[in-house]
Amino acid sequence: MKVGCIGLGDIAQKAYLPVLSALPGTELHLQTRTQATLAAVADAHRIPAGQCHTDLESLLAQGLDAAFVHAPTAVHPEIVARLIDAGVPTYVDKPLAYELAESERLVALAEERRVGLAVGFNRRLAPGYAQCADHPRELILMQKNRVGLPEDPRTLVLDDFIHVVDTLRFLAPGPIEHTVVRARVRGGLMEHVVLQLSGDGFTAIGTMNRMNGSTEEILEVSGQDTKRQVLNLAEIVDHKGQPTLRRRGDWVPVARQRGIEQSVLSFLDAVRAGKTLSARDALATHELCERVVREAWEQAS
């Protein structure tokens, strides 16, 4: 199976390449315009020179069976559209694009061409979060915080807060009937944002504070007099009377803990089976993010 990896930045090197390069029966091809990075990454993963490319056309000429896109978000539309036009099933880091219209265009193009398209919402497959789907979820609380990092609202929401938005949607136990957005934007930079989703018998609240005292990610789901906490995707605390703590095993890879390994394997299994994956549900997350951005700017004006 010939698999292309486009973009060799931090997320590709730390999370995806250790998984992809270890898969049996996979011929991995790398592509980036930066020759020094290409050479260094290829050497680290023992990728032959013939499987290294500095332009997309050279990569496509190899007859790829699947592709992973880890290039900067700004160039996602161009790269993903080219892959879809070439009939290559594509997995792309979130988001599809910064602008909703571009994301809609890519999803429509994939459906028109009948080519699989998947967006990397790995937290849905992270063990700690996936297990929360089996827990009572009358109240869902998620916070993802950073230190001293206010940012342009669209960039913050689409590159980072989108994980919170998608996790709330994933864990919501029923249709979302009400949506509330609150945000603090000063000098054109978003400092914090709060999203509340609710429906019949449940409320889900997601927050991001970019002026926080620490970098952290905390998920809590509760209901029926029980509560489960997931701390930084690594520790699970169940509360029912006395709390019980489960830590990530010493030998569990970070890519598995964060659901990245599972996302890669699931995508490639679908490709092998001839299943055409749809990004239509992922588009619903992008639509909700667009609403967050719009209402944040309205509150700032």
Image (tube, helix red, strand yellow):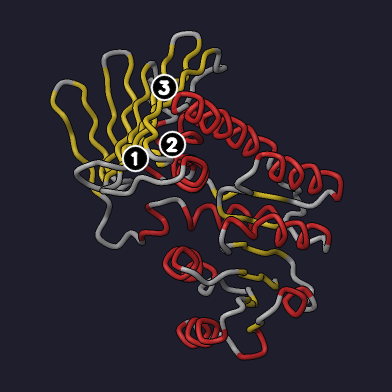
The front one of 276 and 60 is 60
Q: Residue furthest bottom?
A: 49
Residue ID for mark 3: 204
**Gap between marks 2 and 3, in whole Å?**
10 Å
The residue positioned farthest toward the left in the image shown: 242
Mark 2 / mark 3, whichever is N-terminal = 2
Tell me if residue 80 comes above or below residue 296 in the rendering: below
Q: Which mark is residue 255?
A: none
Which residue: 42% across, 28% down?
Answer: 134
Residue placed most toward the observer, 236 or 79: 79
Q: Amino acid at mark 2?
A: Val
For label 1, count other residues whose C-alpha is less than 10 Å away and answer few (under 14), some (14-19) or many (20+): many
Extreme residue in the right direction: 112
Q: Is residue 196 above or below residue 45?
A: above
Name the residue nearer the viewer: 197 or 269. 197
Is label 3 or label 1 in front?
Answer: 1
Q: Is mark 2 in CB contact (under 8 Å) with mark 1?
A: yes
Q: Please provide percent x and percent y for residue 215.
A: 26, 48
**Which image quadrant is residue 203 in?**
top left
Q: Which mark is residue 144?
A: 1
C-alpha distance separating marks 3 and 1 = 14 Å
Badge 2 marks a residue whose secondary structure is helix
Relative side of 24 to 274, left or right? left
Q: Quick check: can you spot residue 145? A: yes
Helix, strand, or loop for circle 1?
A: strand
Can the viewer see residue 28 in this picture? no
For residue 164, which numbered disc appears in the image?
2
The first of marks 2 and 1 along the sequence is: 1
